[in-house]
Structure formats: structure tokens, C-alpha cells
Amino acid sequence: MKTYWGAIARALAIGCLLVPLRLPAMNGPEIMKMVDEVNRKAFSTAVVKTQLSTCKYEKSDSGIRCKDKPRVVVLEVGEKKYGGDNRDGKSIALVLEPISDKGVGMLRYEYYEANRDNENFLYLPALGKVRRLVSGSDNEDGGSFFGTEFYGDDAQARKIDEFTYVLLREETYDDRPTWVVEVTPTAARAKKTAYGKLVVWIDQERKIYLKEDIYNRSGRLYRQRLYRKYSLIDNVWLSRQQTMNNLSTNRITSIDNLSVTYHREVPDEVLTERSLTDFTFRERNLALLRTYYH
């Protein structure tokens, strides 16, 4: 269970405000700094109910299909941003299904400052206590999230100063004008991640991610992430479905955002260890937020 649920709300509820005008030509760092700022300012709070389904697949003429029954995990996630330009944040994830993991919870304090490790806490009902997860190891950043093909690096928001950016080209992808940008970890960040680089497709108009190709340290493409079914909710662009395809193992995970609400008041005390261990306390606070679900 040594995993990052990370800022999973960011992985599940990535969005931005609509920006209809196309800007003049920019370079890679300018593009990614703009996208980072737009997405961070898009919302200050979010509550999401999401389902993750993972299976081994096989290819056919019609596409790919699961070879076995998918493993399904259902989570409820709350997030609140703090500080100037929403750069820091706190979030909590609670497992609803499967029944064997119900009650497992994770708490995360995220810091925008480069080279400052985020703080992560895991609660296992069987042990009855909260355990702090150690930061800074390859296993942590590369470890699977609840047996899915989403890893810690996929879940947490990337700190803009821990990567370098090169604009590779502009092209049309999925009928949208996009920037295609190569994202490479700095020397300091490379010590904490299993990734060699990413190539990302950014919607030029909406400033949202459409696709990511993920390469390992040896330069081999081994996973691919697609963002699908975008809808505008509470003036935030939400990808209702994301898929992560592991090209090496032929395993795929689908994230389906079932319900979501933004911009609601999330009390600070909800994002504490008490919510991990006190079922009555957290349910009392979450019940109102659920009434706003879309």
C-alpha cells in the first residue's frame, strides 16, 4: 500500500478556465508556465467521486479488450488550494470500494516550492493508526496507485521549476489545435523519478492536456495517457475519463469521474488526520458537499 494517491484530485479533475483567443507564438517554458498558472487558478476547491478500473488487455481488429474481470476501486477525493495563486494545497482521498479496502484513507500536503518534498499520510483501518510515508525515493514516485497503471508521478501536480520544456511542434490532435511539448526533469528531479521525459499535447485554446507519452530513463516509450470526454462544469474543464495504457505489460487503467463539484467551501479541519480516523466527523462534513455533485 506504499503508494501516492498524491494530488489525485489534480490527476482526476484537471481543468481550466476557457481562454478563447489564441496567443502569439511562444516557446516551451512560456507555454507550460501559462498552462500551469491557468490550471491552478481554475478552482480553489474540488470534491470528486471517481472510479478506477484496471485489467490486462489483448488487441484485436476492433481495438483492445480486457482479458479478465477488471479490478475496480472507487474513491472520494477532496482538495483545497492555499497561498498565492493557489500554489500550495491539501487533499484527502477515501476508499469506498472494494469492501476489502473500505476506510483506507490518504492525506497529502503539497508544496509548490521546487525540491521541497510533499507530506503524505496513509491510514489503514486494520492497524488503526496513521502512518507517514517517506518522500524522495524512486519506488515512491514510480509505485503503482492501488494496483493501477497510474503512478505517483502521474497523480501529483508537476512543480514547474523541476522540469525543462521544449516546444517540438504545433499540430492538430483530435480536431483541436495543440502544442506538443517535451518535458524533461531537471538533474535534481531526475533523482526522484523513474521517468526520463514526457511528450505532452496541450489544447491551445482551452489550455488543457489531451495526451501524454511517457518515456523511461532509457528513452523507451512505455506508457500513454489519454484525456477524454471533457465537459465544462462550474466553469472548469473536467476530463470525465482518462486512460493509462502500459505498452510494456498490456495493462490499462481507466479513470471515470462519476461526480464532481468545484468552488464549495471545504473546511480546513476536513483536510486533517482526524478525517482519516473519525468516520462520523468526515461524513458530517462531506454530506453537504455531496449535494452539489454534478
Image: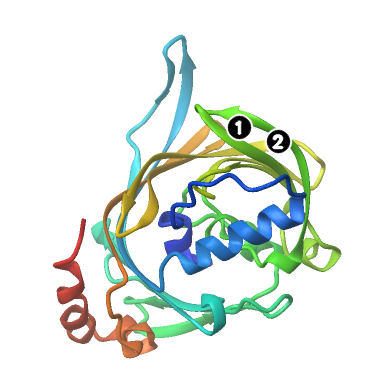
Pick the residue in front: 187 or 113: 113
- Marking on residue 182: none
Secondary structure state at the residue bearing disc 1: loop
Q: Where does the image place residue 98, in percent across and percent down from the top left?
A: 27, 56
Tell me whether circle 2 and circle 1 mark residues in contact (CB < 8 Å).
yes
Q: Which of marks 2 and 1 is in front?
A: 2
Residue appearing at x 80%, y 65% in the figure = 191
Q: Where does the image place residue 178, in percent across and percent down from the top left?
A: 60, 37
Pick the residue in front: 40 or 195: 40
Residue appearing at x 30%, y 60% in the figure = 234
Res 103 quadrant in image = bottom left
Task: Please tell me which of labels 2 and 1 falls first in the chain.
Answer: 2
Note whether 192 is above or below 222 in the view shown: below
Res 188 quadrant in image = bottom right
Secondary structure state at the residue bearing disc 2: strand
The amino acid beneath tag 2 is Leu
Sort mark 2 into few (<14), some (14-19) or many (20+) by Cα contacts within 10 Å. some
Mark 2–mark 1 Cα distance, whole angstroms, equals 8 Å
The amino acid beneath tag 1 is Leu
Pick the residue in front: 105 or 90: 90
Note whether 270 is above or below 34 in the view shown: below
- Marking on residue 247: 1
Left/right placement of residue 18 relative to residue 184 reads left
Q: Is residue 156 at least partly visible in the picture?
A: no
Q: How is the image coloured?
A: rainbow
Residue appearing at x 58%, y 65% in the figure = 37
